[in-house]
Image: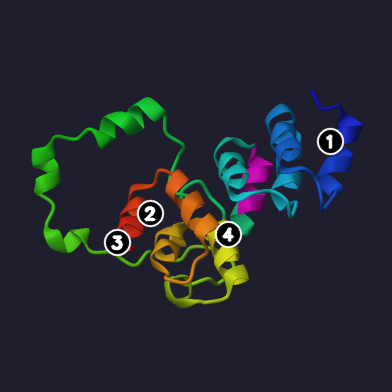
Amino acid sequence: MVDYDAAVAAVQDPNADPILLAKIAYENPEFGANVAVNPRCYPGLKRWIAEFGDDRARETLAQYGFTAEAFGGPVQDQKATAQAAQQPAAKQAQQPAAQAAFEEPVATNPYGFTAEQALTTTDQMQIAQIAQYAPELRACIARNPNIYPALIEWLGQLGDPAINAALASRQ
């Protein structure tokens, strides 16, 4: 368990270890808002805090545009996700081919990143920032011909069907 003084120091440190921040948010919910605004708080941790944090932490994140809904809804049990993925083939075949084409997501990030930027930018740093701070645009990034190989690999590991379809369209 992280002691109180170490937690206070970590949430104020702009170079804090992100794993330590996650541990602090889990073990000390009263620090959730402080963890959420730390520059080393990663999007997945913000999503967790937005869903499971205390009221103060959720309100703080909401002020920055981070809510559980903005990150794709509540965290789901892996079994429920796997069962949903095993839909009958007939039900999947009912989806029109036009729907299989990529739909532009609505950008909900507070940083002003757009789908067009994610699709067309050649700036590698901006691509990385969009991937980190605008998870709703990751499928667009996957279609950008200018992304670097390590990001392609990371996106493929996320297990998101929309991202996987975008990556498959690259080949």
User: Which of pointers 3 and 4 indicates the residue nearer the eye?
Assistant: 3
Closer to the observer: label 3 or label 2? 3
Q: Which mark is residue 169?
A: 3
Q: Name the main secondary structure of what is drawn in magenta.
A: helix
What percent of the width, then of the height, locates residue 34?
76, 46
* Residue placed under numbered mark 4 in the picture: 133
Within 10 angstroms of label 3, few (less than 14), some, or many (20 or more) residues?
A: few
Residue 70 appears anywhere in the view: no
Residue placed most toward the observer, 107 or 139: 139
Residue at 59% across / 54% down in the picture? 62
Q: Amino acid at mark 1?
A: Ala
Residue indicated by mark 2:
163
Residue at 13% x, 52% y is 95
Give the secondary structure at mark 1. helix
Compare marks 1 and 2 and give the one earlier in the sequence: 1
* Location of residue 139 by image quarter: bottom left
Residue 56 in magenta stretch: yes
Q: Earlier in the sequence, mark 3 or mark 4?
A: 4
Q: Under tag 2, what secondary structure?
A: helix
Residue at mark 2 to residue at mark 4: CA–CA distance:
16 Å
- Which mark is on residue 7? 1
